[in-house]
Image (cartoon, rainbow, N blue to C red):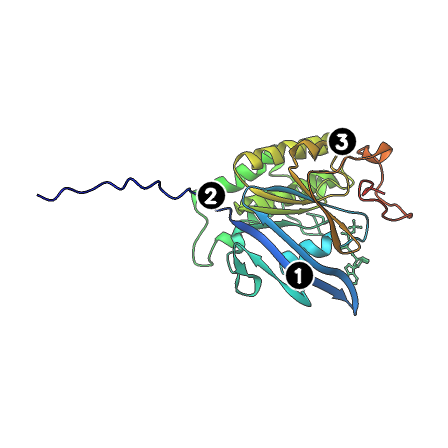
Amino acid sequence: MQLRRESTATPAKRVPMVESVVRVSGGVVAFGGRPILHGVDLDVRRGEVMALLGANGSGKSTLVRALVGLVPLSAGQVELFGTPLPRFRDWHRVGYVPQRASAAAGVPATVREVVASGRLSRLPWWRPASRHDREAVERALETVGLAHRARDSVAKLSGGQQQRVLIARALAGEPEVLLLDEPTAGVDLPSQQAFADTLRTLIGVGTTILLVSHELGPLEPLIERAVVLRDGRVVHDGPPPSPVGHHAHPEHTHVHPHGARSEAGWFL
Ligand SMILES: Nc1ncnc2c1ncn2[C@@H]1O[C@H](COP(=O)(O)OP(=O)(O)OP(=O)(O)O)[C@@H](O)[C@H]1O
């Protein structure tokens, strides 16, 4: 009988694979020949909670829009879940909430109807909504604290609540990554707090978050990584820089005519 010999060699050390969820390499965007992003490199990995910060006009929204294919790159490339953007089809894995959008937009829809529309990316036309689809919609409504308003017309809701409807719409698709463009801009402090609770829930279930913001306010404790853009270039990538003086105040307005200055003073 032949005995099987156990290997005494030390097994190779396991290096955890950190999956890239959103990656842009050498990303250049120009509008009408005017460069807005100058060779941006960014890699957001699974489970990361990242804030994209910077002054007005530094290119934050442009970058996020480029990441979801709404703005074409004139050089460089974007990959989502390791697939180059032109070949990416799994849009149900990506939730995007644009900046300053209204959930009402003149459409006489209820809160639940708007949120349910976020499920469409998961529903091929031949399949009717299943129980799981309906549960995902209800869960999304609960996550943003609007289950009790589900039957109301979205037009009746405040700006902050409409923003939450749009977040719920993105959540209804059960995305693995959520890109949020200034979700708390112009939103009062209690709503910012409510949004922070929503974010905490999403982080708890492992959702990767990329959040555009100019001031973190109540979101700050949740952010592990901050990338700061200035004039279309990454000038900081690491722990969130500390806010300075009154700029840290959540009610402080965003417009700074004196422009960006030192790295520490990215709010300026
Ligand atoms: N579609 C467009 N056509 C032409 N210029 C544009 C377009 N979109 C953005 N820009 C310009 O690109 C620059 C960057 O704008 P962007 O909205 O990305 O900045 P931002 O950092 O998100 O600013 P804010 O904090 O004010 O939203 C600005 O100068 C803006 O005017």
Residue 130 position in % (x across, y down): 43, 46
* Residue 142 visible, this orientation: no
Residue drawn at x 50%, y 56% as measured from the top left: 90
- Report the amino acid beneath label 2: Pro
Q: Which mark is residue 16?
A: 2
Left or right: 16 as drawn, with respect to 198: left
Task: Indicate yes or no: mark 2 CB to ligand 1 under 8 Å.
Answer: no
Q: Quadrant of the N terminus?
A: top left
Q: Which residue is mark 3?
A: 189
**What residue is rendered at 44% in x and 43% in y?**
132
Marks 1 and 3, Cα distance to the nearest angstrom? 37 Å
Going by the numbered disc 1, the residue's amino acid type is: Gly
Of 36 and 105, the residue lying toward us: 36
Q: Measure how far apart labels 2 and 1 are at the Cα level.
A: 26 Å
Helix, strand or loop status at disc 2: loop
Residue topped by disc 1: 26
Q: Quadrant of the C terminus?
A: top right
Who comes first in sequence, dot 2 or dot 1? Answer: 2
Residue 5 appears in view? yes
| Residue 37 image point, x, y percent | 74, 59
| CA–CA distance in space, label 3 to label 2 | 39 Å
